[in-house]
Image (cartoon, grey):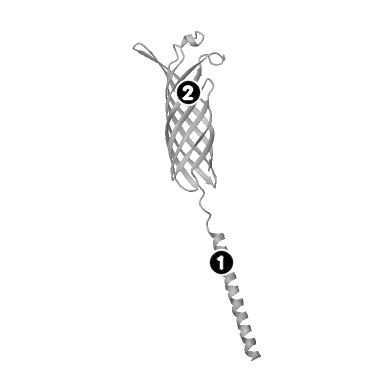
Amino acid sequence: MSEVTGHATSSRRKAGTKTMALAAAATLAACAAWTAAPAPARADFFWVEGFTGYSYANLTLIKSGGVAISQASVKDSGYTLGGAAGVKLSIVTLGLRAGTSQYSSFDINTAALDLGLHLGKVIKPYFRAGLGYSFLKIDLLPGTGGPRAKARGLLGDLGVGLDVGFKVVSVGAGIDVQFLNLNHSKRARDLGQVDTTGWGNPVGLQLHAHVHLTVHL
């Protein structure tokens, strides 16, 4: 009788040990599967960007006097810097972009609303277009610290570039072209009687070659 009881007890112990081993193995397998599972995708809805780079401007100053139209050209190179912020829906971005470009005798400030397409996951080419407002100040007597004339008006903006993504940030480079159509807002009487007959409404373009850093939130 005791042998039968002992045999039954031993069988129960073996069965219990086997059950515990199977449970432990299942637990370890579940933990391993959970650890190996990919992390949930980070939300990429808001983004903030800063940029800086080289800037080139080619403007034609158009002055109309009666039926005669005179033109003068202004070309210069300098630097640009600024920032942007917006939202991203799938591959489409909508944002507000503002910047300043500094030249030897004038500067141009811009603000535009743009729409873009961002493709890829890690290597991400992009294309964007925008419409906005531009404000220009130009020295009437360069190098003298004298009065500055002002102009303001619409701009059209086209951009293309390439980003490389690293989790919550991406770095990249791009080229932007801005088309400007401005009207001057100061007259000679407002500028200390400086002769402005050679200065007209600026029409032309800006070209930017820049690097940028974007944070995705």
Q: Residue at x 52, y 46 (%)?
A: 165
> Which residue matches tag 1?
29
Mark 1 or mark 2, earlier in chain = 1
Mark linked to residue 135:
2
Q: Residue at x 60, y 83 (%)?
A: 11
Q: Position of residue 125 (x, y in %)?
A: 46, 43
The crowd level at tag 2 (other Cα within 10 Å; few <14, some 14-19, many 20+) is many
The residue under label 1 is which amino acid type? Ala
| Residue located farthest toward the front when viewing the structure as drawn | 1
Front residue of 109/75: it is 109
Element carrying mark 1 = helix
| Residue located farthest toward the bottom when viewing the structure as drawn | 1
Look at the image and tell me whether residue 50 can be seen. Answer: yes
Front residue of 165/160: it is 165
User: In the image, is residue 102 above or below residue 3?
Assistant: above
Q: Nearer the viewer, mark 1 or mark 2?
A: 1
In this picture, residue 83 sits left or right of residue 7: left
User: In the image, is residue 39 above or below residue 213?
Assistant: below
The answer to whether mark 1 and mark 2 are in CB contact below 8 A is no
In this picture, residue 186 sits left or right of residue 24: left
Mark linked to residue 209:
none
Q: Position of residue 187 (x, y in %)?
A: 46, 12
User: In the image, is residue 160 above or below residue 183?
Assistant: below
Q: Quadrant for the N terminus, please.
A: bottom right
The answer for how far apart the CA atoms under marks 1 and 2 are is 64 Å
Q: Residue at x 44, y 33 (%)?
A: 113
Occupied quadrant, residue 25? bottom right
Front residue of 14/99: it is 14
